[in-house]
Amino acid sequence: MSNGEDPQERPEYVRTVINGLERYNPEAAVSLESYLQEQCEKKFCDSNANRALLKLYQLNPDRIKDEVITNILVKAMTQFPSPQFDMALHLLAPSIANPGPNTHSELVEAVAKLRALNGQLEGAQYARFWATLDSDDLYADLTTDIAGFEEIIRVRIAQLVSQAFREVSVSVLEAWLGLDDEAEVKKFAVETCGWKVGGEGLIQIPKNVENEAKKADIREDVNIEMFGRVIRRSWEETS
């Protein structure tokens, strides 16, 4: 999995901003916003730099751009399972992240919807995630700036599946990946993941250090003296 905290794509000028006093300069927001756009277009994520931008918004609320906030949250979501989304969320104003019942705005609604999506991914509710994503055109609007969003999510899901399974049925994988038919599932499994199509509607996943069955050796070091203490205590309590 790619490093979404300190990616190798980070340019030197961004490194200078986030590692020095420049991170408190309101004018640095322009550079970080431009860098976020680059992340969205080139399919990588720098959560560290994006949090620095949200921190600048905290200190300079007049500079807040709703679209930038939602793009940061969507990019953080693509890093699941991880705390990146919640870390970004905690840098938003309480009126946005945890609004009261009478607080209504487009940004508040957008954040709430993204939070629900992220919760489904973190909870491995993949079929529900795709159903939710297709349930409202607002989701398409919120993710449109992130190039290859759905493909990124599918690859992350596949990576997690490969860590837990040696084989999985095509029908289950179809639901988890949000694909429309078996042919698409098999093509993704073979061409993107390098898996094999087996018989009886199963996809075979190569053995790796995560999904390999391991024998667990459990040893309990109990000696005669420990048994003796237990027996004496039992005898004392009954006498």
Image (spheres, grey):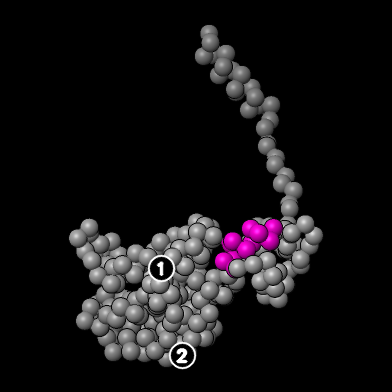
- Of badges 1 and 2, the one in the foreground is 1
Q: Which residue is drawn at the image coordinates 34% and 64% (left, top)?
A: 112
Q: Which residue is drawn at the image coordinates 25% and 64% (left, top)?
A: 94
Residue 224 % position (x, y): 69, 26
Earlier in the chain: of badge 1 and badge 2, it is: 2
Would residue 47 be visible to someone looking at this image?
Answer: no
Q: Nearer the viewer, residue 188 or 18?
A: 188
Kindly identify which numbered label has been placed on residue 190.
Answer: none
Q: Which residue is drawn at the image coordinates 57% and 75% (left, top)?
A: 151
Q: Residue 186 magenta-drawn?
A: no
Q: Which residue is drawn at the image coordinates 74% and 59% (left, top)?
A: 201
Q: Residue furthest front?
A: 181
- Tell me the crowding category of disc 2: few under 14, some 14 to 19, or many 20 or more residues within 10 angstroms, Cα based: few
Q: Circle 1 sits on which residue?
A: 136
From which residue to which does the magenta span run? 168-179
Q: Residue 172 magenta-drawn?
A: yes
Would residue 23 be visible to someone looking at this image?
Answer: yes
Image quadrant where one finds the N terminus: bottom right
Q: Residue furthest left?
A: 102
Q: Circle 2 sits on which residue?
A: 12
- Tell me the crowding category of disc 1: few under 14, some 14 to 19, or many 20 or more residues within 10 angstroms, Cα based: few
Residue 75 % position (x, y): 45, 75
Question: Could you tell me what secondary structure mostly forms the magenta stretch?
Answer: helix
Above-or-below relation of 63 to 107: below
Q: Quadrant of residue 177?
A: bottom right
**CA separation in Å, label 1 and label 2:** 39 Å
Which amino acid type is marked by label 2?
Glu
Above-or-below relation of 232 to 45: above
Element at label 1: loop
In the rendered structure, the answer to whether residue 48 lies left or right of residue 28 reads right
Which amino acid type is marked by label 1?
Asp
